Amino acid sequence: VGLDWPKPIIPAFNGKGNLIASWNPHPKGIKGRPTFVIVHGGHGLIPGDFATALWARDELGANTLILDSYWSRGQQENWETYTRLGANARMLDSIAAARWLNAQGVDKDKIFLMGGSQGGWTVLRTFTDEPFMEQYAKGLYRAGFSLYPVCNSKGWKTDPTLGPYWGPVLVFTAGRDTATDPNKCPARV
């Protein structure tokens, strides 16, 4: 389909190894275009992540980066949610991805973070306005798109606080969403 095969190209936030990603600069060049970082859900990378990248490339003229957080660490999936590979670890991956994209020469003011389910949770955590994200994440992304996210927010290490947000985040849920109660995703500005 014209997308690059995932390979270990993104230096991890802590500098220990590389994260696997599919980097797809637009065929007509990266400059002047939006760039979407697509983060997967608890299932790991699936065909839908690649379909989203194709849609962004073909319909929006975007560069796309499909970021993996599980294969990179020898894990296929993470259905349990509250583990070491939850929202905090994946937030670090999203910071690493944006830093790498900046080094590739993309337009810094046109980078967007998009994810569904646990990936949506990652978007919400990355945009949460706390001192760590203020220092490392703020300003790396223009906006976030959180699709039917996990919206748990108990303030625990494995279930961290969400919101208020340092930048615009659009949250998409549905009234019949059985995985995540939409009422747990209040708007916080």
Image (spheres, rainbow, N blue to C red):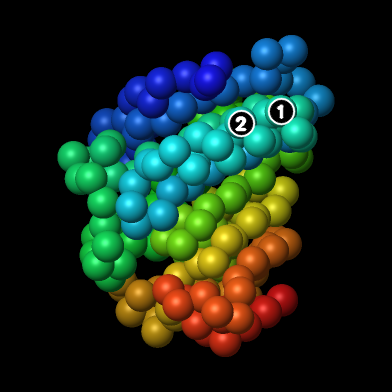
**Residue at 40% across, 84% down:** 154
Asked if 33 appears above or below 131 in the picture, the reply is above
**Residue at 51% across, 57% down:** 116
Specify few, some or many for label 1: CA neighbours under 10 Å numbering under 14, 14-19, or 20 or more.
Answer: few
Q: State how far apart marks 1 and 2 are (Cα).
A: 6 Å
Evaluate whether residue 182 shows in this view. Answer: yes
**Picture quadrant where residue 179 is located:** bottom left
Amino acid on which disc 2 is placed: Leu
**Picture quadrant where residue 167 is located:** bottom right
Element type at mark 1:
helix
Can you identify the residue that label 1 sits on?
58
Asked if 180 appears above or below 73 in the picture, the reply is below
Asked if 145 appears above or below 181 in the picture, the reply is above
Can you identify the residue that label 2 sits on?
54
Task: Pinpoint residue 83: horizontal percent, then vertical percent.
Answer: 24, 65
Element type at mark 2:
helix
Specify few, some or many for label 2: CA neighbours under 10 Å numbering under 14, 14-19, or 20 or more.
Answer: many
Task: Pinpoint residue 55: horizontal percent, then vertical percent.
Answer: 66, 36
